Image (cartoon, grey):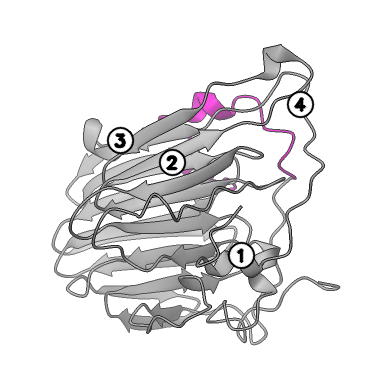
Amino acid sequence: MYDKSDPRASLASAGTGRAVPAGGYAPPSYVRFYETPPQEDSTEGRSWYARGQNFVVIHTEARDGARFERKGQQDEYVLILPDVATSAQVTAGGEQQACEGNAVVFVPPGDSSIEIPRGGRIVRLFTTLADDLVARCPNNDAYATPNPLIPPLQAWPAPKDGYRIRRYGLDVHVEPGRFGRIFRGSTFMVNYLDPRMEPRDITKLSPHHHDDFEQCSLALDGEFIHDLRWPWTPNMHHWREDEHAFCGSPSVAVIPPPSIHTTRAQRHGLNQLVDIFCPPRMDFSKKPGWVLNADDYPMPEGA
């Protein structure tokens, strides 16, 4: 149920068939990077890991001159450069590109490297095909048993003109009727939500659910409360208590289907949330003008 002021109110109604796994609903997973030491601390920087069923998020405080390589990467991945001052030199697919900050960058499969000349924070997104990265995630236990409501990962089609380094700037004007700043590739959809500079109006929340995919909410700045509720079933053993989870930044909240959820910014000052979906979500893709790079990446055949 979206507030009428929310652009998502124009989406087609979500399905009502909420299948219940035999063992009940899967819980959310919260990874508050600011509460724990990094999983990696090296000359390249400090990196924290988290995962969902299909993806891995790596939040890095890169040091000057840091270099991050991938050899034989199986599929396309994503680099987020949240800050204008943090640029990257990306090499992949036989090309090299200087990528200014405040951007989302899609990096092709195969061998690649990312250099951060002046340091700064970066975020990288990989699918769980990257076994070596999955192994470093502190919340692996949450996915020891896959959630049967989520289909196996299936990549979307390759770009029309082939894989290459693609940088998309985040300096995009807010447009009435469009939800956030959405970019999609073959493996991920990234929605860089419009920043909030004050706590969210609690009379205009948008509780909603997804039937068959996770939502990863990456908090880059500010503070948030993630409110979750699960539908009742005839079997009371499946019932779960409501959750109102506080997450500062940086942090990741992985919200499973079919939990009803909404998120409230808490801070006076910048609250920046990025919603991540793996693979891209179809309903957003079908909204004309919502996906800003839709011309580069086709939807699956028959969509």
Amino acid of disc 3 = Gln
Question: Which image quarter: residue 294?
Answer: bottom right
Whether residue 190 appears in this view of the structure is: yes
Amino acid of disc 1 = Ala
Residue 288 appears at what percent x and percent y? 65, 82
Q: Quadrant of the C terminus?
A: bottom right
Number of marks in the image?
A: 4
Judge by depth and name the residue closer to the eye, 32 or 4. Answer: 4
Q: Earlier in the sequence, mark 2 or mark 4?
A: 4
Are the residues flagged by discs 2 and 4 in contact, CB closer than 8 Å? Answer: no
Label 1 or label 3, whichever lies nearer to me, is 1
In this rendering, the answer to whether 28 lies above or below 125 is above
Residue 120 appears at what percent x and percent y? 18, 61
Q: Earlier in the sequence, mark 1 or mark 3?
A: 1
Residues at marks 2 and 4, CA–CA distance in whole angstroms: 22 Å
- Residue position marked by numbered label 4 in the rendering: 21
- Residue position marked by numbered label 1 in the rendering: 9
The answer to whether 245 appears left or right of 130 in the picture is left
Residue at image position (71%, 71%) is 157
- Residue position marked by numbered label 2 in the rendering: 253
Residue found farthest to the front: 203
Q: Earlier in the sequence, mark 4 or mark 1?
A: 1
Residues at marks 2 and 3, CA–CA distance in whole angstroms: 18 Å
Label 4 or label 1, whichever lies nearer to me, is 1
Mark 4 lies on a secondary structure that is: loop
Whether residue 136 appears in this view of the structure is: no
